Every structure is written in structure tokens, then in C-alpha cells.
Image (tube, helix red, strand yellow):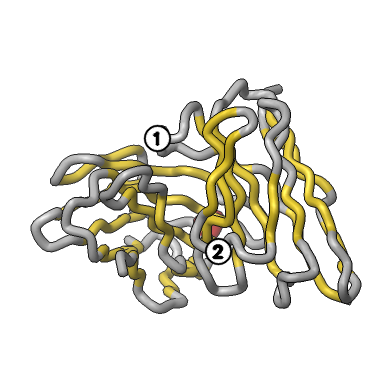
């Protein structure tokens, strides 16, 4: 079965530190990779997407994709308490009419 | 403001009862989706629709039904056949079905009385 796996959490980092969130996927032919942030009781919001190997930076966020090793990660620099949320990794797997497959998410807590 | 509106925010279901969750969008998106989220779990796809009067089962369609009579509306009915309906339900839309950037509604928390 095609799967998306995220590290079991929760992850706790001090304010100002770098938070590193990892995600692996089983389908080698996956094309597109997304990170959603979800605050408790709220809906997910898209914060990063990446299609090509390498790094993609947007402000304090960097997405890293390594298709050979089948992982995608999200780095959050200068972590803030407002970054405390659940982060969902989502991958578009191969196959006709394939839809986004989500990981279970990892909860990040940034300590003031 | 364009967006997706889900109602109600909280819903309670009695044993043997069907309940309907509303989802309306004014983004002019062709594709709409319903996801279920259980505590500590990711999102699982229930149904999706590419166009009016057409919809497809997702990974966990059993016990649910949908309709798409208007482009703007994609209601989800949780039937009595769904034995474990307590979850957070999220409606989403995208420009077309293979467009991967999803826009989500605010969700409906369904609980069983």
C-alpha cells in the first residue's frame, strides 16, 4: 500500500531554535509534495510545496526533497510559539486519478 | 471574500440517524472533496467530485453518500451504516481535480449522542 509516514511526535523545541520535521513516502514515482499546518480545531493551510529535488525556501520555512531517498522535510528557522501546531505532509502518489495522500502529522510545540 | 463555508460547526447524531453536512464554495472551483480526520490521524478521503452530477469514492466511502447538483455545493450525508462517525470532517476544493493545492473549509465536528 502506498503510504506517507511522519515521525511520531510530539516535537518540542525552544523558541529561536530550528525545528526539523521529516516525512517519508513509499511510492517512488510520487511527483508533488506539500506541507500543511493545522492549528488545533482548525482546518489545514498550505504553507509549502515542492516538486524538484533540493531545497525551497520561503521566509523562515525551507522544504527539502530527496527523491532518491524518498523523503521530504520541513525546516522552520527561528521557531516561534505561534509555530506550535500539527504539520501534515501530503504527497501526490502515482497512478490514474491519484489524489493527495496525507501523513498522520506531527505536533510541534515551541517553548517560550 | 471567496472561500469555503461548512456548516454546522458542531453536529450530534443519534443512533440510527442520518445527518447531512453542508459545504458551499464561491471560488468557482470545479473539484470538491470530503475528508475525515480522527484524533492523531491524517486526513482520509471519503468522496470527491470533479464536476457537477459526478462524484467518485475515496478511500473510506462506506457509510457515506454525497451529491453534486450545483457547482458550488457538495453536501455529505453520514448514514446510519457508518458505525463510527465521530470525527472532524473537512470539505475542500481545488481549481480542477488534478490541481493539488487544496483550499479547506473550517470543518464540522460530528459526535454521537
In the image, A88: left or right of A71? Answer: right
**Dot 1, crowdedness within 10 Å: few (<14), some or many (≥20)?**
some
User: How far across and how far down the image is residue A31, in percent?
Assistant: 24, 45
In the figure, B28 relative to A34: above or below? Answer: above
Chain letter of the residue carrying label 1 = B
Residue B93 shows in this picture: no
In the image, B100: left or right of B33? Answer: left
User: How far across and how far down the image is residue A104, in percent?
Assistant: 46, 68
**Numbered circle sitting on residue B41:** none
User: How far across and how far down the image is residue A67, in percent?
Assistant: 14, 54
Residue found at x 50% / y 27%: B95
Query: Which-is-in-front pick, marks 1 and 2?
Result: 2
Residues marked 1 and 2, same chain: yes
Residue found at x 46% / y 34%: B97
Q: Where is residue B68, by image quadrant?
A: top right
In the image, A58: left or right of B20? Answer: left
Chain letter of the residue carrying label 2 = B
In the image, B9: left or right of A109? Answer: right
Q: Earlier in the sequence, mark 1 or mark 2?
A: 2
Residue found at x 35% / y 74%: A7
**Numbered circle sitting on residue B60:** 2
- Say which quadrant the N terminus of chain B sits in: top right
Name the residue tied to disc 1. B98
Q: Where is residue A102, by image quadrant?
A: bottom left
Q: How many marks?
A: 2
**Dot 2, crowdedness within 10 Å: few (<14), some or many (≥20)?**
few
User: How far across and how far down the image is residue A9, in percent?
Assistant: 43, 77
Residue A39 shows in this picture: yes
Residue found at x 31% / y 56%: A75
Q: Nearer the viewer, residue A108 or B88?
A: B88
Amino acid at each position: 500500500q502506498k503510504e506517507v509516514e511522519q515521525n511520531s511526535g510530539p516535537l518540542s523545541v525552544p523558541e529561536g531554535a530550528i525545528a526539523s520535521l521529516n516525512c517519508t513516502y513509499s511510492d517512488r514515482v510520487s511527483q508533488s509534495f506539500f506541507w500543511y499546518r493545522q492549528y488545533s480545531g482548525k482546518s489545514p493551510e498550505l504553507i509549502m510545496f515542492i516538486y524538484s529535488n533540493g531545497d525551497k525556501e520561503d521566509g523562515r520555512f525551507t522544504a527539502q526533497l530527496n527523491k532518491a531517498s524518498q523523503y521530504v522535510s520541513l525546516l522552520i528557522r527561528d521557531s516561534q510559539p505561534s509555530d506550535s501546531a500539527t504539520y501534515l505532509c501530503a504527497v501526490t502518489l502515482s497512478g490514474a486519478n491519484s489524489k493527495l495522500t496525507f501523513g498522520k502529522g506531527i505536533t510541534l510545540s515551541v517553548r517560550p | 471574500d471567496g472561500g469555503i463555508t461548512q456548516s454546522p460547526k458542531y453536529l450530534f447524531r443519534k443512533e440510527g440517524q442520518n445527518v447531512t453536512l453542508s459545504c458551499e464554495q464561491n471560488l468557482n472551483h470545479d473539484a470538491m472533496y470530503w475528508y475525515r480526520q480522527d484524533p492523531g490521524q491524517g486526513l482520509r478521503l471519503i468522496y470527491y467530485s470533479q464536476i457537477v452530477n459526478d462524484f467518485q469514492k475515496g478511500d473510506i466511502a462506506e457509510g457515506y453518500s454525497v451529491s453534486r447538483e450545483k457547482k458550488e455545493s457538495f453536501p455529505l450525508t453520514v448514514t446510519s451504516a457508518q458505525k463510527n462517525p465521530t470525527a472532524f470532517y473537512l470539505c475542500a476544493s481545488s481549481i480542477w481535480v488534478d490541481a493539488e493545492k487544496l483550499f479547506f473549509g473550517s470543518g464540522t465536528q460530528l459526535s454521537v449522542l
